[in-house]
C-alpha cells in the first residue's frame, strides 16, 4: 500500500525535493579533470581566465576571484577602508557574513529595516541611520532581486559613502538593463553550490575603480606584490623577489574551482531562464491564495531569483510557521528559512544589539520560509511543490 501523508488524500512523493541544489554535468567534470592533469592546480591560468570571463559577462572592468563569498565581503571592506570606529549600514535579513565582514575590520554593523513588500533593505531606513561615523552601506540583493539601487546610490553619493553590493544571490540579475557588477563601487558574489553557478565554493569582487581593484588584489594575497611600481626598491634582487606591503589574507581561489566555474559560466543563461520559469509558475499558483503572501518585485529589477520565499498569512491559517514547515517536509518538499535576523544571534546580543531593532524584518522572519528553487528541477518537481503547498494550506485553512 502506498504511504500517505498525515494530511491524507494524495500519495507522498518518494524522493525529497530540497530547497536548493547544484547542477553539475559531464563537461563540468571534464573541465576539472583537465585542470587536475595540467601543470597548475592553483594560482594558475584558470583563475585568470575566470576573472576575464566574469568581466566579460558582467561588463565590470575588474574582477578578483577569491575562496568564498565571505572572503569577497571581507576584501571589499578592506578596500573600502573600514576601520575601528567606522559604522557600516546593512540589512538583518541576510547571512551573517554580510555583517561579520564589518566586524573583521573592527567596524560596527548598523542594521536598517527592510521594505515589508520587497524584503530588501529600505532606503529610508538607511538615511535615518547615517551618522558622522558611517563609512559604507552593504546592500544585499535578497533572493536575487536587486535593491532600490538608484535611491541607495544617491544616498551614498550625498553622504560620501562607499556602496558595497552583496550580490551573493543575484549574479545574472539586472537593474534597468545593467548587469549586477556595474551598479555599486564594489560588488561581491558567491559560488556556493546553491547559487546561480558553483565552484563548490568561491566568490568574486567586481569593481570599475582601479584604486579599489589594487587594494583587493593585495587583500586576498597576503598583502604581497610583485609589481615593481609598488616596491620599496628600484631594482629587485632577482626574479624571485616580492614584497609584503600591507597585511592581507590567503583568500586565493584554486584553478580546480576556477575551471568548474568557467564551465558553469557558459551555462548561466540556461540556468537563469529555468529559474525564471519556475518563479513564474510559483507566482501564478500562489498569488491568488490569501493564505500566502508573495514577495513583490520592483520594476527596475530583472531578477535571477536565488530563493523563492513564502510568507504565511498566519491570520488565515490555524497553524504555526513550524507546523507548516514540518507539514511540507512530510510531503517530501524540504523548505528552509532565510534568514534569522543577524542581530538576534548571541554574538550580536552580547555586543548590545537588542530584539525589536527592525520590526519589519522580525515580522517577516516569523512568517517566512524558502521553498525549492533550482534549475535542475523538473516540471513534475515544480508541480509537486505547488501541490504540496496547496495541500498544506487547505489542511490548515481557517
Image: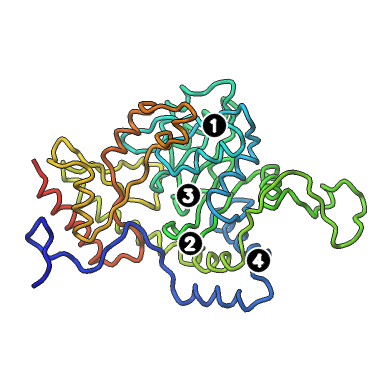
Q: How much space separates mark 2 and mark 1, taking CA atoms? A: 29 Å
Color scheme of the displayed model: rainbow
- Residue bearing mark 4: 42
44 vs 195: above or below: below
Q: Which residue is mark 2?
A: 198
Whether residue 96 is situated above or below residue 224 in the rendered picture: above
Residue drawn at x 39%, y 26% as measured from the top left: 357
26 vs 135: above or below: below
Q: Is residue 290 left or right of residue 208?
A: left
Q: Earlier in the sequence, mark 4 or mark 1?
A: 4
184 sits to left or right of 348: right
Q: Give the numbered dot on residue 88.
A: 1
Foreground: disc 4 or disc 3: 4
Residue 71, given in percent of the width and then of the height, sits at 58, 49
Work out how far the residue at label 4 is from the one at label 2, CA to CA, in angstroms: 17 Å
The circle on residue 168 is 3
Amino acid at each position: 500500500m502506498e504511504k500517505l501523508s498525515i494530511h491524507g488524500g494524495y500519495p507522498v512523493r518518494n524522493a525529497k525535493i530540497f530547497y536548493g541544489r547544484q547542477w553539475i554535468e559531464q563537461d563540468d567534470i571534464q573541465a576539472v579533470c583537465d585542470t587536475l592533469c595540467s601543470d597548475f592546480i592553483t594560482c594558475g591560468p584558470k583563475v585568470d581566465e575566470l576573472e576575464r570571463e566574469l568581466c566579460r559577462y558582467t561588463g565590470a572592468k575588474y574582477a578578483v576571484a577569491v575562496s568564498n563569498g565571505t572572503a569577497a565581503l571581507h576584501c571589499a571592506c578592506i578596500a573600502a577602508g573600514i576601520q575601528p570606529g567606522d559604522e557600516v549600514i546593512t540589512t538583518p535579513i541576510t547571512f551573517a557574513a554580510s555583517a561579520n565582514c564589518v566586524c573583521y575590520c573592527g567596524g560596527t554593523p548598523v542594521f536598517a529595516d527592510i521594505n515589508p513588500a520587497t524584503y530588501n533593505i529600505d532606503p529610508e531606513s538607511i538615511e535615518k541611520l547615517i551618522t558622522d561615523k558611517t563609512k559604507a552601506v552593504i546592500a544585499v540583493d535578497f533572493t536575487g532581486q536587486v535593491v532600490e539601487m538608484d535611491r541607495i546610490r544617491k544616498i551614498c553619493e550625498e553622504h560620501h559613502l562607499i556602496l558595497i553590493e552583496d550580490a551573493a544571490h543575484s549574479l545574472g540579475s539586472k537593474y534597468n538593463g545593467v548587469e549586477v557588477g556595474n551598479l555599486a563601487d564594489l560588488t561581491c558574489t558567491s559560488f556556493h553550490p546553491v547559487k546561480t553557478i558553483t565552484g563548490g565554493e568561491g566568490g568574486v569582487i567586481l569593481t570599475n575603480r582601479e584604486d579599489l581593484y589594487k587594494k583587493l588584489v593585495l587583500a586576498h594575497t597576503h598583502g604581497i606584490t610583485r609589481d615593481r611600481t609598488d616596491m620599496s626598491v628600484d631594482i629587485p634582487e632577482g626574479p624571485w623577489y616580492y614584497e609584503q606591503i600591507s597585511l592581507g589574507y590567503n583568500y586565493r581561489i584554486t584553478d580546480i574551482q576556477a575551471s568548474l566555474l568557467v564551465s558553469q559560466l557558459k551555462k548561466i543563461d540556461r540556468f537563469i531562464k529555468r529559474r525564471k520559469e519556475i518563479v513564474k509558475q510559483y507566482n501564478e499558483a500562489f498569488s491568488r491564495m490569501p493564505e500566502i503572501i508573495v514577495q513583490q518585485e520592483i520594476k527596475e529589477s530583472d531578477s535571477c531569483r536565488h530563493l523563492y520565499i513564502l510568507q504565511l498569512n498566519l491570520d488565515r491559517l490555524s497553524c504555526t510557521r513550524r507546523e507548516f514547515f514540518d507539514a511540507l517536509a512530510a510531503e517530501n518538499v524540504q523548505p528552509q528559512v532565510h534568514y534569522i535576523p543577524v542581530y538576534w544571534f548571541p554574538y550580536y546580543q552580547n555586543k548590545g544589539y537588542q530584539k525589536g531593532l527592525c520590526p519589519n524584518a522580525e515580522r517577516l522572519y516569523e512568517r517566512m520560509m524558502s521553498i525549492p528553487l533550482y534549475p535542475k528541477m523538473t516540471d513534475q518537481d515544480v508541480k509537486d511543490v505547488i501541490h504540496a503547498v496547496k495541500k498544506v494550506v487547505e489542511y490548515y485553512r481557517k
